[in-house]
Amino acid sequence: MSSHPFVPIVRTRVKLAVCAALTLAAAGAGTPVWTVVALALTCAAIPLAVALAGGGPLLRELLVPVPRAGTTSGLAHTPEERERFVT
């Protein structure tokens, strides 16, 4: 048993994306309506569970991921380190 009771939001975001993709694939493949409905309800339950567990800010983090600092250039270097590499 882990010491932290919550699942990382990134892992939850991946599960939401997979569930949404499975729902779309099931609807497109012509699976029974109840299968598509069950997948869609599961997909809708994920944000609901996140909102109940962490409120609005955690739900916003799930649905609108913020870019991490330092990843905009593709390099994980500080501006000073980039200047040294340019010389």
Image: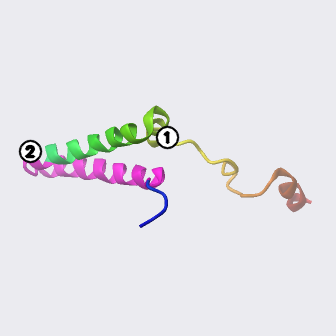
Q: Residue furthest bottom?
A: 1
x and y percentages locating residue 35 in the rendered image: 12, 50
10 Å neighbourhood of mark 2: few (<14), some, or many (≥20)?
Answer: few
Residue 30 part of the magenta segment: yes
Give the camera-side residue of 18 and 53. Answer: 53
Q: Is residue 16 left or right of residue 28?
A: right
The span shown in magenta is 6-35
Q: Nearer the viewer, residue 30 or 71?
A: 71
Res. 43 image quadrant: top left
- Pick whichever of labels 2 and 1 is earlier in the sequence: 2
In the rendered view, would you say 80 is above or below 66?
A: below
Residue 8 x/y as whole percent: 47, 54
Q: Residue at x 66, y 51 (%)?
A: 71
* Magenta span main SS: helix
Give the residue pinned by disc 2: 33
- Residue at 36% over, 50% down: 17
User: As drawn, is 78 to the left or to the right of 56?
Assistant: right
Q: Describe the element under mark 1 as helix, strand or loop.
A: helix
| Residue identified by numbered label 1 | 61
Residue 58 spot, x, y in % from top left: 47, 39
Give the number of marks.
Answer: 2
